[in-house]
Image (cartoon, rainbow, N blue to C red):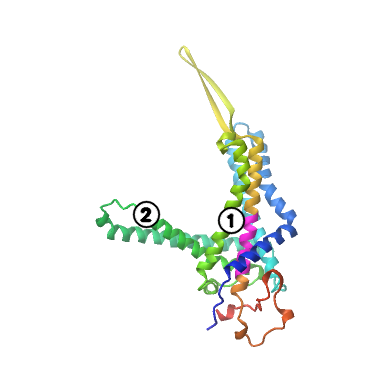
């Protein structure tokens, strides 16, 4: 049986940082477009539909947000595929495939991972609630204050760990022959906590960075609600006996400057985080597919080994047949 590769979390995180900067520099036009197009499309669609239908402004806003969400989903998949292709091209430049079918299949994989995680969490929740009620219910007399939070913590941990293992399939989409789900599951065996820890660390870093960048806006304008102003959209008057009753329908709208800046910051952070996460899982896929040199029939020459942001370690023949 093939020896398992120990996943080097901090080394991969270092290369994730380098690759994120590389992608931002190399594809800066794409990145800028994906930062600006969603908010611009929301504003444009809102204006067009509200101008066309008049009083149906709230419905127009919902429609614009829905359309923007669809665009954002496609943008996420395209960005992720670009990142996967840039990294995997170093070790397998002859089999890179990026077309509309790749995007569709990538989306199907994401949906399948989502439903698998939901089904597993639903099963854990039912079993945990049932077992907890039978065992601890009589002991605590229905006053257990820790069972619920502990069960939620368990469900969150299992769900994130499961998703992390299954997400290793996504980078293989760009080579045209994705790994099977069984191969993907075996690929991450023994490295679940390392994979999960690296993913959570990336998320925490971006959360803290976004908070730090947004702090000046909070200092200038206070809480987000402090920048909200009420806009009167409709006014109705009615005679009720000797009294005239006037009703106003108002909507909340952020002041232009803080709302635009916050919008830009949030989308810039989201786009950069997507690139970082895609880089992380691409590098994880590359490292975990390695075959240790003592298992190879022939050690390739130094010139054939990976270099650059992947380091000198990857003598990276695919390990799929050995999983």
- Rendering quarter of residue 49: top right
- Rendering quarter of residue 130: bottom left
Q: Residue visible at 57% across and 57% down? A: 203
Q: Nearer the viewer, residue 13 or 4?
A: 13
- The overriding secondary structure of the stretch rendered in magenta is helix
Q: In the orientation shown, which residue stands out farthest toward the top?
A: 242
Q: Which residues are magenta?
A: 272-284
Element carrying mark 1: helix
Instruction: Report the residue marked by disc 2.
Output: 148
Task: Using residue 134 as the reference point, say whether residue 249 is left or right of it.
Answer: right
Q: For the residue carrying disc 2, how many other residues have a C-alpha within 10 Å: few (<14), some (14-19), or many (20+)?
A: some
Q: Is residue 273 magenta?
A: yes
Q: Residue visible at 50% across and 73% down? A: 190
Task: Using residue 313 as the reference point, say whether residue 133 is left or right of it.
Answer: left
Please tell me whether residue 135 is drawn above or below residue 305 in the rendered image. Answer: above
Q: Earlier in the sequence, mark 2 or mark 1?
A: 2
């Amino acid at each position: 049986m093939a020896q398992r590769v120990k996943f080097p979390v901090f080394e991969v995180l270092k290369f994730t940082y380098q690759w994120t900067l590389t992608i931002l520099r190399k594809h800066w036009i794409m990145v800028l477009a994906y930062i600006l197009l969603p908010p611009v499309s929301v504003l444009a669609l809102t204006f067009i539909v509200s101008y066309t239908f008049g009083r149906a402004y709230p419905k127009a806003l919902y429609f614009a947000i829905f359309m923007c969400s669809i665009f954002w989903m496609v943008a996420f998949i395209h960005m992720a595929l670009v990142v996967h292709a840039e990294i995997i091209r170093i070790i397998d430049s002859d089999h890179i495939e990026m077309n509309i079918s790749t995007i569709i299949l990538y989306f199907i994989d994401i949906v399948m991972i989502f439903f698998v995680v939901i089904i597993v969490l639903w099963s854990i929740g039912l079993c945990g609630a049932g077992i907890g009620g039978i065992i601890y219910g009589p002991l605590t007399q229905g006053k257990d204050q820790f069972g619920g939070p502990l069960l939620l913590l368990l469900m969150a941990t299992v769900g994130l760990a499961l998703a992390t293992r299954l997400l290793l399939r996504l980078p293989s989409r760009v080579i045209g022959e994705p790994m099977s789900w069984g191969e993907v599951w075996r690929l991450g065996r023994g490295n679940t906590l390392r994979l999960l820890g690296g993913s959570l660390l990336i998320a925490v870093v971006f959360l803290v960075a976004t908070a730090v960048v947004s702090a000046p806006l909070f200092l200038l304008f206070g809480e987000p609600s402090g920048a909200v102003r009420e806009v009167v959209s409709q006014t109705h008057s009615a005679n009720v006996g000797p009294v005239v009753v006037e009703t106003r329908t108002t909507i909340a709208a952020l002041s232009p400057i803080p709302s635009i800046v916050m919008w830009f910051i949030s989308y810039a952070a989201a786009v950069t985080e997507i690139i970082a996460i895609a880089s992380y899982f691409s590098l994880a896929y590359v490292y975990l597919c390695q075959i240790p040199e003592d298992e190879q029939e022939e050690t390739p020459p130094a010139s054939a080994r990976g270099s650059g942001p992947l380091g000198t370690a990857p003598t990276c023949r695919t390990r799929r047949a050995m999983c």
